[in-house]
Image (cartoon, rainbow, N blue to C red):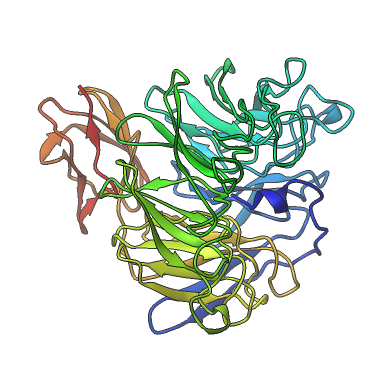
């Protein structure tokens, strides 16, 4: 997720690039530039990647493609890049344009996403955005166009990825739209919403921000939501709150809303992305500004409401540790947190870093433009164990890249969904699964069907309890990256 200040407005023009492959090795990790876009196949990727049932990685670009209105692409782990859809393929871009938001892989195996422009409404000014479904082969269906009602109470111009709740419904945010009019940061007449939408396109607005003077509930949410262990959804806004520097909020699926924390600048300011919940149950996120050096932070927030600044960027000479993080962090299978910053580093073009749960930060890679610059979309750990990301600038010809960062972590499996009742269908995603001989849910054996080398279909067995899913193959055991929650 990109900085709201960067995203809203014109997108800088960038040059055409050629496909490349390059590898940089250090004592602790291997950095590989997998591909660069050519313009015709996309430009300016700014959101995290996701992995499909086929084991390939999928993402969006804001620009480029057939009409320079953005694309959806897939890339294999070894760097073969394919454009599967170019936006504005329909008259007046009713299929959408400028997909700032990334994708989410849903339980049905399709990807769901949003565009910031295009759609059936707000024309001919450019459109107010869409929600779409796309299959791995590139078949796109627009399921909703924002501003379907006068005044856009349903939201406008989404920039953060959707998530799928445990109820199968999609949840998201928009930084504009809604009915709030009490002092929005951008000077608009509306300050953003939280919404839910069924997979067939029925949208419900759950909360409108700035519904009180001064926006104590927050303003212009720019990050994705998180459904926590308690079933509630958590998110952030970069503006508003009791002290004007953004908030952490909680909202239920029925719209009951609570402001959990207000930033004051000294402890961080402008959280641009959403939160993650760690294996310990605590929440982690980043702020773009504020903190000890006023160049952003990584923070911890407990379910009980206790806030801790874990790390303040620019703590090292010349900001070699990075600065102004836009994207959040991801917790990898070693328990550490990994992320990116678009500023700082040895070459002042951004960094990739590791942070321990206790707050010790290690820069892993400093971008030097030849291998990319200003990473905005954060990192994603694929089930081969490696971390993947994008940069919207840099590369050998000065444009955008896709990269892999191998930090020595082994392969694992993941489940979709990550929770369910006994006898619920579960997809298990991984690598080299064709030799699977057993699947267990926290030690309880489950029947399974091998679909492909990257996919197994199973059901939650009778007697299963919450815990890790383990897949036994001829090469050994593969454990899930998170515990599967068995629900009553």
Q: The C terminus appears in which quarter of the rendering?
A: top left
Residue 297 seen by the camera? yes
Say above or below: 476 vs 87. below
Say above or below: 29 vs 231. below
Say above or below: 167 vs 365. above
Residue 386 seen by the camera? no
Q: Position of residue 192 (x, y in %)?
A: 64, 31
Q: Is residue 53 left or right of residue 15?
A: left
Q: Position of residue 172 (x, y in %)?
A: 55, 32
Q: Is residue 221 left or right of residue 334?
A: right
Residue 449: quadrant of the picture: top left
Q: Position of residue 455 (x, y in %)?
A: 36, 41
Residue nearer the viewer, 308 or 380: 308
Q: Residue at x 79, y 52 (%)?
A: 11
Residue 374: quadrant of the picture: bottom right
Residue nearer the viewer, 130 or 189: 189
Residue 107: quadrant of the picture: top left
Residue nearer the viewer, 78 or 100: 100
Q: Residue at x 50, y 49 (%)?
A: 263
Q: Position of residue 478 (x, y in %)?
A: 23, 53
Q: Is residue 62 left or right of residue 481?
A: right
Q: How many marks?
A: 0
């Amino acid at each position: 997720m990109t900085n709201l200040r960067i995203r809203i407005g014109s997108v800088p023009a960038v040059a055409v690039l050629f496909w490349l492959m390059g590898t940089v090795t250090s004592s602790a990790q291997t950095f590989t530039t997998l591909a660069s876009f050519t313009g015709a196949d996309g430009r300016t990727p700014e959101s995290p990647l996701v992995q499909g049932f086929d084991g390939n990685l999928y993402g969006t670009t804001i620009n480029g493609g057939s009409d320079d209105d953005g694309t959806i692409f897939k890339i294999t782990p070894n760097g073969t890049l394919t454009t599967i859809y170019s936006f504005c393929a329909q008259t007046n871009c009713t299929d959408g344009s400028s997909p700032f938001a990334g994708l989410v892989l849903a339980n049905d195996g399709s990807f769901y996403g949003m565009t910031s422009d295009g759609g059936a409404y707000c024309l001919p000014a450019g459109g107010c955005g869409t929600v779409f479904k796309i299959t791995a082969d590139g078949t796109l269906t627009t399921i909703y166009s924002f501003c379907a009602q006068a005044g856009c109470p349903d939201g406008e111009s989404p920039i953060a990825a959707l998530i799928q709740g445990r109820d199968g419904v999609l949840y998201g945010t928009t930084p504009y739209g809604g009915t709030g009019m009490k002092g929005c940061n951008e000077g608009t007449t509306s300050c953003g919403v939280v919404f839910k939408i069924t997979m067939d396109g029925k949208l419900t607005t759950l909360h409108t921000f700035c519904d009180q003077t001064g926006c104590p509930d927050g303003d212009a949410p720019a990050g994705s939501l998180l459904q926590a262990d308690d079933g509630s959804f958590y998110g952030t806004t970069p503006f508003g709150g009791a002290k004007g520097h953004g908030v952490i909020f909680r909202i239920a699926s029925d719209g009951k809303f609570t402001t959990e924390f207000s930033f004051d600048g000294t402890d961080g300011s402008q959280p641009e992305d959403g939160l993650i919940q760690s294996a310990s149950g605590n929440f982690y996120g980043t702020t773009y500004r504020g903190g000890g050096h006023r160049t952003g932070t990584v923070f911890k927030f407990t379910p009980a409401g206790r806030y801790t600044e874990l790390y303040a960027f620019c703590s090292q000479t010349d900001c070699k540790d990075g600065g102004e993080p836009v994207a959040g962090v991801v917790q990898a299978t070693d328990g550490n947190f990994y992320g990116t910053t678009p500023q700082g580093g040895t070459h002042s073009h951004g960094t990739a870093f590791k942070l321990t749960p206790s707050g010790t930060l290690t820069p892993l890679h400093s971008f030097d433009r030849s291998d990319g610059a200003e990473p905005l979309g954060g990192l994603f750990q694929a089930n081969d164990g490696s971390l993947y990301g994008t940069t919207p600038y840099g590369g050998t010809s000065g444009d955008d890249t896709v990269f892999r960062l191998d930090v020595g972590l082994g392969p694992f499996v993941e489940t979709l969904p990550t929770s369910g009742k006994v006898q619920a269908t579960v997809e298990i995603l991984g690598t080299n699964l064709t030799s699977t001989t057993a699947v267990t849910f926290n030690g309880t054996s489950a029947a399974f069907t091998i679909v492909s080398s990257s996919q197994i279909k199973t059901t939650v067995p009778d007697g299963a309890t919450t815990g890790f899913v383990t897949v036994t193959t001829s090469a050994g055991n593969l454990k899930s990256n998170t515990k599967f929650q068995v629900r009553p």
